[in-house]
Amino acid sequence: MRLPVKLTPDDLALRAQELADAEATLADAEVRLDAFVEAAKGTRKGIETEIADARAEVGRLARVVRDKAEAREVPTMEDPDFENGTVKVFRTDTSELVATRVMGHEERQRSMFERDREPS
């Protein structure tokens, strides 16, 4: 049966030393836990970023597969129409008209050389 026993001064000193050691062990474990939690936050944030990037790529590729097309850089050519004040933009690979826009003020100013080439 476990019953209380009065400690001798040597027993009390031993338990005091054990208490100090246990407190040091506890403090060390708490510090290591806090460091681990902080490191885990950084790791979690990194993994969450990877997941978000992977989801975005999956979404992009799913749209490409669904639409059977993707946006790429394609050379274009502009054809100014001075009479209507517009510029038509054509794809050079398919000659398809992709845009028509209003000519800017600077674009409306034709050089003397262009005027010389036009038939009168």
Image (cartoon, rainbow, N blue to C red):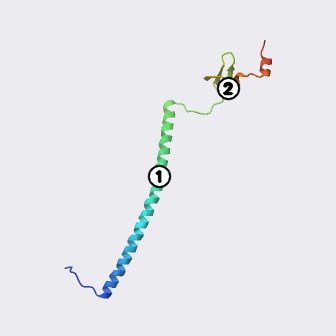
Q: Is residue 105 left or right of residue 59?
A: right
- Count every numbered label the image shows and give the total: 2
Residue 7 found in image quarter: bottom left
Q: Which of pointers 1 and 2 lies earlier in the amino acid sequence?
A: 1
Q: Nearer the viewer, residue 2 or 20?
A: 20
Q: Are marks 1 and 2 in contact (CB under 8 Å)?
A: no
Would you say 118 lies left or right of 93 here? right
Circle 1 residues within 10 Å: few <14, some 14–19, many ≥20: few
* Residue displayed at 78% across by 18% down: 115
Please identify, in this view, whether the residue under mark 1 or under mark 2 is nearer the observer: 1
Q: Nearer the viewer, residue 62 or 13?
A: 13
Q: Residues within 10 Å of mark 2 (few under 14, many from 20)?
A: few
Q: Residue at coordinates 34% horizontally, 83% vertically from top-left?
A: 14
Residue occupied by mark 2: 77
Residue 36, image x, y percentages: 44, 62
Q: In the image, what residue type sits under mark 2?
A: Met
Helix, strand or loop at label 2? It is strand
Instruction: Determine the residue positioned at 35% across, 79% down.
Output: 18
Q: Position of residue 62 (x, y in %)?
A: 48, 36
In the rendered image, the quadrant that contains the C terminus is: top right
Badge number at residue 45:
1
Type of amino acid under label 1: Lys
Q: Which quadrant of the structure image shows residue 84?
A: top right
What kind of element bears circle 1?
helix
Q: Nearer the viewer, residue 100 or 50?
A: 100
In the depicted structure, whether residue 31 falls above or below residue 120: below
- The N terminus lies in quadrant: bottom left
Cα distance between the residues tagged 1 and 2:
45 Å
107 sits left or right of 119 in the view: left
Relative to 25, 1 lies left or right:
left
Indicate whether 25 appears above or below 105.
below
Q: Is residue 28 above or below residue 68?
A: below
